[in-house]
Amino acid sequence: MSKNELLQIEDLTIELRTKKNRYNLVEEVSFSVGKKEVFGIVGESGCGKSVTAYSIINLLTTPPLYISRGRINFEGTDLTELSNTEMRKIRGNAISMIFQEPMTALDPLFTIGQQLKEILRFHYQLPEEVMHERAVDILKKVEIPRAEQLMKEYPHQLSGGMLQRVMIAMALLNKPKLLIADEPTTALDVTIQAQILDLINGLKERFDTSVIMITHDLGVISETCDRVAVFYAGHVVEVSDVETIFSDAMHPYTKGLVRSVTSLGEKRKELYTIPGVVPSIDTMGKGCRFYDRCSRKMERCRDVVPALKEYGRGHMCRCWLFEGSEHE
Amino acid sequence: MGLLKELLHDKIGRIGLIGVFIVLLTALFAPLIAPHDPVEMFPQLREAPGKSFIMGTDNFGRDVFSRIVYGARVSIMVGLISVGIGASLGIVLGLAAGYFSGWLDNIIMRLMDILFAFPSILLALSIVSVLGPDLQNTIIAIGIVRIPIFTRTVRAEVLSVKSQEYITSARSIGIKDSRIIIRHIMPNIISPFLVQATLSLSSAILVEASLSFLGLGIQPPNPSWGSMLNESRKIMELAPWTALYPAIAIILTILSFNLLGDSLRDILDPKLRNIE
Amino acid sequence: MAGDICADAGFLKDPSMNKSLLAVEGLRKYFPLKGGVFNKTIGYVRAVEEVSFCVNKKETFSLVGESGCGKSTTGRTILRLEEPDEGRIIFNGEDINGYGKESMRRMRRHMQMVFQNPYNSLNPRMKIKALLAEPLQTHTVLSSKEIRGKIDEMLERVGLSASYKERYAHQFSGGQRQRISIARALITNPALVIADEPTSALDVSIQSQIINLLMQLQDELELTYVFISHDLNVVRHISSVVGVMYLGRIVEQAPTEELFARPSHPYTQALLSAVPSLLPGKKKERIILSGDVPNPADPPKGCPFHLRCRYAMDRCRTELPQSVALSDGHWASCHLL
């Protein structure tokens, strides 16, 4: 792992085990997140992006989900090898996570102040006044007005946008190196989303924190991310910097996705669409998972899954159109 | 149907189903199963269980086994009819209260609250003492007591279904209220209703047994497990089998229905959620 | 208000001469808030407040806004799925707000709705063919054979195979269910379709399929749409006229390109600038609004937007702004204008 890399995921495979069958929800996922970087993970529902994110800090419900293969390297340690106790020291500390629905992520029975202090208390033993001060401080840093007063309020008294700020504050309390944000603005109105994205954008510089931004919204990706991994049906199909993803993507799915979104606005012209639907986990063939919907499919695509290969300057792609012509 | 298969798969459901089946068969084929006339008094008074009377005889020389068998008939009949009364009235009231809301809902629910305020046995007791203790009135009393729980269950389900978008969609198409209730709401409330009906049956049987035990339900010499228990009180030390067998019959029957109802609930509930 | 926007929305002798299919005047809908021991009415959620607009035939009028702005309630109130407290709803020349229960029920074949949630808007226990037959059985006297024919035709029209009619809703994906909902709404040949966030619950790659379908059907069947959405990109793509709602009121309204080129109300400006741009690297000039989306149960006095407006003056706190005509078909309610 190079000096500038913070997190490196290698060949991660997560299995769903039911009474009758085993399915690979995500397969051979590889990408790395650098320091002071916002890394986006984009994909549609069922693509495995949330499952991957949850697995980083071992939040998967096991059973029925298992990490069957792969490594998650964080600052020299393989997170998949850690015990639950060791992992707990990292969660909320070196790696934090924020979720889509702030209302359900906060305990309704405790005040904001109590919940913030609980996080501090778990990781460090500090006197009460110090904890209080740190809590108020972090609330101010996420631009919450009247921070002192907010400490005494309960989650149900706050709006969605405010709660999301509180959640971000909670995640930043212990100055994490990495913040995982799982669809943080999906449930918010667009003007509130703008506020939160603005805040997240500032984290790189102000807090020296890298962010993994998980979303289905390409607009959010465009506004906040430096590099992006595109997921489709459990596979990483492309990884690159954000400009390349939008202007010069390699994988047909990425291109299709970008086109369907950017063709909006050309007044009443027929929108570009990707025909068909995402395959369900039990009907996927043994080849490329995008085969049925791809406009450039070949024989080979149906039978064998292409490998995720690098094509220069950190641009990775999983597609038979390019394999055989890679220049590493 | 598929439901039956799933019930048999589930350990609890299997036991419940078998138990209920046995009771139902016993009730249905009572004349073929019972070796003697349940009210015939034999000279062997209080005889211990043996070859000719496998469960012994009671204080009047009647065959306990035959009385148990015919008692099943009483229990099932009272159970089915009274739950039938309670369920049908309950469904109508629940649908009306849930779908139309407003003042109708208020009146119906306040009435139900009044009925609910009384413990069911006490309520049944009062009704029977007013009407007079016999089979018919017992059924009516238990039936009335059953109405509030059905109304409440049905109403709650109707309210939750009503808020679903496919009901709004039906209204927006211009479908008449009556058709919405019959085609859209009712099929979606059948499952919880079934569960409630099964559990109610066990409760009804218990109430009947209690009433008869108190002497206010089925009158002797007609066999009823509750009245058998009542009669056995004085001679329990001399002839414990006269109390034992009716008690076991009551317990096993109620247990079977409850297990069946529980299993039904487990099977039907998550499936309902899965359909969405 | 309505008179300024659509001068010909009045009662012309021959309704077919009207350019507008739907004219809404002064629509108001409040929801009572109950509380206390006796469940008394302690306040009102002012969901829709004096909304007026008019929609021309075969065009698409979009209502945009954030949560709590009243756009969905407006849609439902127009169809009288919620009873309006006040206002006129003039459909094809007649005020349907005055219609009795039965007349309204019969009117519904001409004005249909497509709902947001594809997982909830189809009865899970009915086969598709029953769901599609129902509107026809309710409003027409067609024979079963004719109905079956129409069902097949409609399914093909929305891009699904006719054999799907034997299946149940849960056997389809979100996008396919939405197609079925559209088929159900269109099977009685309505003139007006109100689409309430029809693509918001769908994946991006499916959204474009459904939008294409809606546009195609509009051309084929000569439909008039009222399109309710919070997604400005989609709205920009398909609308003829856009109305921006805030706290139950339309604060600005204009033909689509005019609105996006010259947004005049401060809220519209902030809303447009908040939409993430799809050109990475080109950071937008962003107007970040302070504060939160307000609560319609407790609206501020004066202009509803003044608490978050960066241009707020004293006058804004006390006086409700009137609507000002800015150019042809473009007006906004703001004291600055």
Image (cartoon, helix red, strand yellow):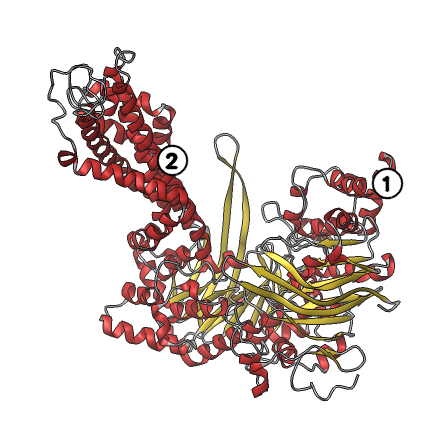
Residue type indicated by callout 1: Glu
Using the rendered view, name the quadrant where residue C308 is placed. Answer: bottom right
| Residue in the foreground of this view, choosing between B48 and C37 | B48
Dot label at residue A133: 1
Say whether residue A269 is visible.
no
Rounded to the nearest whole Å, what is the CA distance between mark 2 and mark 1?
A: 53 Å
Residues indicated by labels 2 and 1 sit on the same polypeptide chain: no
| Residue in the foreground of this view, choosing between A243 and B194 | B194
Mark 2 vs mark 1, foreground winner is 1
Q: Chain of mark 2?
A: B
Q: Quadrant of the N terminus of chain B?
A: bottom left
Q: Chain of mark 1?
A: A
Say whether residue A23 is visible.
yes
Disc 2, SS:
helix
Residue at 28% in and 13% down: B236
Dot label at residue C194: none
Q: Position of residue A161 (x, y in %)?
A: 69, 52
Relative to C204, residue C82 above or below? above
The crowding category of the residue bearing disc 2, from other C-alpha atoms within 10 Å (few below 14, some 14 to 19, many at least 20), is few
Tag 2 residue: B106
Using the rendered view, name the quadrant where residue B77 is placed. Answer: top left
Relative to A5, residue C97 above or below? above
Residue type indicated by callout 2: Asn
Residue at 12% in and 27% down: B36
Q: Position of residue C207 (x, y in %)?
A: 55, 71
